[in-house]
Image (tube, rainbow, N blue to C red):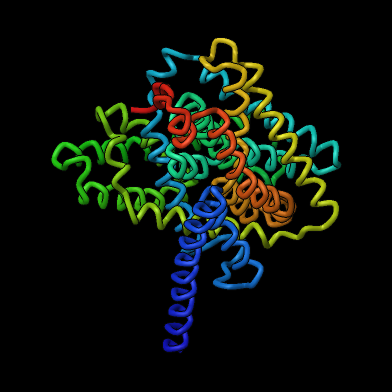
Amino acid sequence: MAGRFGEAAGLVTFEWALLLALAALAGHLVQRYTQLPKIVGYAVVGVLAGLLGFASAAWPLAGIGLFLLELGIAVVLFEAGARLPLRWFRHNPMVLVQSLAESVLTYAAAYLTLRALGLDVPVVRALAVIAMAASPAVLARVVSDLRANGPVTDRALALATLNTLYALTVGTAMLGTIDRGDDSMLTSIVSSAAVLGLSLLFGALLAGLLAAALRVLHPSSQDTVIIMLALIAACATIVTPMEGSAPLAALLGGILLKQFHRRPWVWPRHLGTASSMLNILMFVLVSMMAVQADWSHSITWAALALIVVRLLAKAGSLLITSAGSGLSLRQAFWAGIAMVPMSAVALLLTSQFVVASHSIGEQVAAIALPVILVTELLGAVLVGTALRRSGEAAHAWRRNGLPPPAAEESRP
């Protein structure tokens, strides 16, 4: 029996290793010959793997698949948090106003649209929360591929980080009440505050330990990177069972570390191969899970409706709040378009809703999975288009003989 288990584990390991190699190659070829982001190649490999049942993972996510997804998200969000300076909000409070307006309007638009389609309130609430979150992982990957720099890039990254914070806080809080039909405002506020407080506690502990390590280690050393990955992995292991959110704790830890240490955003760039492999695995896993959705006629229309109203809400909210925000209308529009992608955070929340309540969660997943798949693929392309049309992709300003556009304060 032990031999059969070892053979099965070895086969799964071989399949995942082959998948990662194929995804890396596909990403390179897609970018080289089509100028599309590498994520498109990663996602296509995941889609094909899901359709063929290759290296299949159980749904909802559990075990090592869930841990790797949470770890990948946590690493991305920790770096995103470490690039988000709180002093920026003091100098330009409209960024916070934009983030709140964008999240609230997205939630409201998704809620009203899905209710109009006849979905039950618990299902609609869960889907509306999932729709709030953009994907910092997709944005960061496309920005890196295009070497983009400028106000649209920085604003999109900041807003995606903030709405992910909101979605994780509210979504994790909903897990305990979704199956009880308890949707009172007071209960939601108390639950969200508890999740945020617990995640903040572990985030502060994570930031404190890393700040202490940075006093004796060089920020760019390999030892620092190993310690960071180990501590984030430990955080991901212990926070979720305590009804907190591991990705949220990592995000808050990154934000706090930036306050504890002068330049913590230098060393995440040296994560190198380990971080890249986690990212590729995360994108492949997301698309492989999302393609397993049941694409019935009614589900397809509901998913398309959610995609459209979500795009309109995000772009429209930024246009409405552009006055005094430091962005022109044109820049605000492209920043809104860059908010389209959904990926790992949305998949994680969807999987958690299925675990919390199978009956409600399956209805949520039926719509969320197609939306995640489409917005991951289409969103990556739209992000690239937004960065090029706003003149912030590296080739755009180099081709025109211009200096790089001035970045906002979110960059070091």
Q: Residue at x 51, y 19 (%)?
A: 95
Q: Is residue 191 visible?
A: no
Taking 346 as reference, is 102 above or below it? above
Residue 392, horizontal then vertical, whole percent: 48, 30
Q: Nearer the viewer, residue 407 or 204?
A: 407
Q: Residue at x 20, y 47 (%)?
A: 221
Tell which of 2 and 8 is nearer to you: 8
Q: Nearer the viewer, residue 350 or 222?
A: 222
How many numbered discs sit on the rendered protein? 0
> As drawn, is 262 to the left or to the right of 398?
left
Q: Residue furthest top?
A: 324
Residue 186, above or below 133: above
Q: Is residue 173 left or right of residue 361?
A: left
- At horizontal 37% and vertical 52% (from top left) the residue drawn is 275
- Residue 187 lies left or right of residue 125; in this view the side is left
Q: Quadrant of residue 17?
A: bottom left
Residue drawn at 49 percent across, 33 percent down: 396
Residue 292 at x, y = what percent? 68, 62
Rendering coords of residue 242 (x, y %): 45, 48
- Please tell me whether residue 229 is drawn above or below residue 132 in the rendered image: below
In the rendered structure, the answer to whether residue 226 lies left or right of residue 160 reads left
Q: Position of residue 164 (x, y in %)?
A: 53, 36
Q: Is residue 91 visible?
A: yes
Which quarter of the image is occupied by the C terminus? top left
